[in-house]
Amino acid sequence: MSLPDETVPLASFVQEEMIDRASQSLAQCLARLPPIVRLRLLAFMHLVEFPDTMKAALEITPSGSMRLVLDTEVAPDNAHRH
């Protein structure tokens, strides 16, 4: 007969601590970015989370440069204004 699986409290604590530190580090990195970069990241995240509300156009020039244009017809509510 095998012993029941036990969750190790230390492992859970370490995992929570790692998630907390990663979140803090990410927040610090984002705070250092210029506002336009943060806005572009927010638009891209919105495209990933709500693809039905966004239009995306990828333009590629013969030289190889790329431009992703994101647009929405949905007016943002007050919670999403930046």
Image: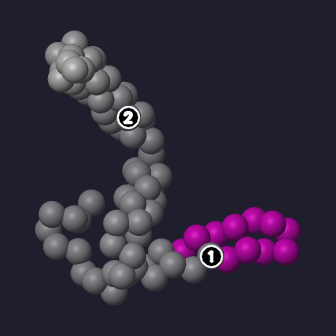
Q: Quadrant of residue 33?
A: top left
Disc 2, SS: helix
Q: Which residue is mark 2?
A: 26
Marks 2 and 1 close (CB-CB < 8 Å): no
Q: Give x and y (percent) for residue 70.
A: 48, 74
Q: Give x and y (percent) for residue 40.
A: 45, 59
Q: Quadrant of residue 7?
A: top left
Q: Is residue 18 left or right of residue 34?
A: left
Q: Is residue 43 above or below residue 11?
A: below
Given the current orientation, which residue lies at the most extreme front position?
1
Given the current orientation, which residue lies at the most extreme left position?
78
Please tell me which residue lies in front, 4 or 78: 4
Q: Which mark is residue 33?
A: none
Three-letter amino acid code at disc 2?
Leu
In reply to whether residue 66 is colored magenta, the answer given is yes
Q: Quadrant of the C terminus?
A: bottom left
Q: Quadrant of residue 2?
A: top left
Residue for point 47% across, 52% down? 37
Please tell me which residue lies in front, 8 or 67: 8
Q: Which stretch did the figure color magenta? A: 59-69
* Mark closer to the chain start, 2 or 1: 2
Q: Quadrant of the N terminus?
A: top left
Q: Is residue 16 above or below residue 42?
A: above
Q: Which residue is mark 1?
A: 58
Q: Is residue 78 above or below residue 29?
A: below
